[in-house]
Amino acid sequence: MSARLALYDLTRPELIAQVEAWGLSPVHGARLWSSLYYEGRGSFEEMTDLPVRLRTRLMEEATIAPLPVAREQHSSDGFTRKYLLALADGRQIETVLMRYHGRTTACISSQVGCAMGCVFCATGQMGFTRHLSAAEIVGQVMHVDRTLRATATAPTAPALAEPRHDSPHHRHERLRNLVLMGMGEPLHNYDAVLRAVDILRDSNGLALGAKRITLSTVGVVPGIIRLADEGRPIHLAVSLHGATQAERAALVPAARAWPLDALMDACRYYVRKLERRIFVEWTLIDGKNDGPDQAHAVGALLRGLDVQVNLIPLNPTAGYAGVPGRSENAKRFQEILAEYALPSTVRQRRGIDIAAGCGQLAVAESV
């Protein structure tokens, strides 16, 4: 028996073309798309407004492929949930829902494990297992979307984010932001990740705005250049962590494949080509890269480039002995960056008690 067609793998034109190939009107294809994304329906049985012939074909040959929840954890901060989601082959990934007053963010994985090997990252410590498909990436976002819809119907649900008022079908807490900062290196899985982004941005579906999507990379130079050449409108965040090649390579082994000079050239190309700011991520590790000398080195490296520096206190992982930079060091780091006319923020820490923070996502091998 051939594999079932994963609907979350298809763009809207592809989905409509598939329905036409089954001998049905493209109108029904558009209606199916709306059921999947605009209405967030998770089973064919719920799609009672579709023709019986189409629903029968879908049940026989296609799958929505929802990702079952193997475990759900709620942080004591009251704003963070982490989901361990099961894949069809028995592998597992982690996805995080973060609430802030006025907005809701999903942190999504792009791979099972990661090949980049950043020493302070729990996912990097796992090693690489495989890429996720576009359907598996989209499926994480739709899981979060359905969670928000369900929360909106609960009588005790807190109103922590803005409801969506553009349609009576969408009077629920809306997913506002998407960050590809979970397990894996998104630019190592470029085609599937950007296909998923295109599906999620479709204005007739979930309609996530490009300015609300951020892709984070450790510095995969060919991917950065390709993003620029393709004119992708989403935000780019680059994990730096070291201001010299030797310092960076000690923390980010991928720097041996894509040295700092090549990375900076790629960043300059991206900014020049797209006329768009890059976010630079810097993990603050006490006594290692959070001192004034490091701050001046970062300032000199980035001076003149349109960037914003996000300072991220190290989150603990079992495989790395470093500790987070102290708040007074972060403040001094920001003051020095300001001397170089570089804006910066210190990232708010969320979900640390359930290992849902930046660099903490990981799962035990399940197959």
Image (cartoon, rainbow, N blue to C red):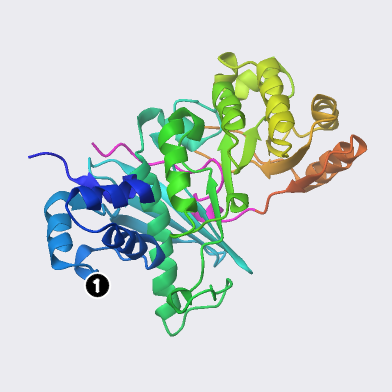
Quarter of the picture containing the N terminus is: top left
Q: Is residue 358 magenta?
A: yes
256 to the left or right of 43 = right
- Let me know if residue 118 is in the magenta part: no
Residue farthest toward the left in the current orientation of the protein: 1
Q: Nearer the viewer, residue 310 or 193?
A: 193
Q: Residue at x 84, y 39 (%)?
A: 342
Task: Find disc 1 in the rendering and name its residue.
Answer: 49
How many numbered marks appear?
1
Looking at the image, can residue 202 be seen?
yes
Q: Quadrant of residue 237?
A: top right
In front of the other: 40 or 301? 40
Left or right: 335 as drawn, with respect to 102: right
The amino acid pointed to by label 1 is Asp
The image position of residue 228, as x and y in percent, is 62, 30
Name the one closer to the observer, 196 or 323. 196
Q: Nearer the viewer, residue 13 or 243?
A: 13
- From this view, report whether residue 43 is shown above or below residue 194: below
Instruction: For mark 1, give the secondary structure.
Output: loop
The residue furthest right is 339
Magenta-colored span: 349-367
149 relative to 358 in the view: left or right: left
Q: Position of residue 73 (x, y in %)?
A: 42, 59
Question: What is the x, y in percent for residue 185?
Answer: 49, 33
Q: Point out the residue furthest to the bottom here.
A: 155
Residues packed near mark 1 inside 10 Å, few (<14), some (14 to 19) or many (20 plus)? few
**Residue appearing at x 72%, y 42% in the figure:** 311
Question: If the image is split into quadrants, where does the C terminus sit?
Answer: top left
Q: Is residue 110 visible?
A: no
Residue 12 in the image: x percent, y percent? Answer: 37, 51
Q: Main secondary structure of the magenta part?
A: loop
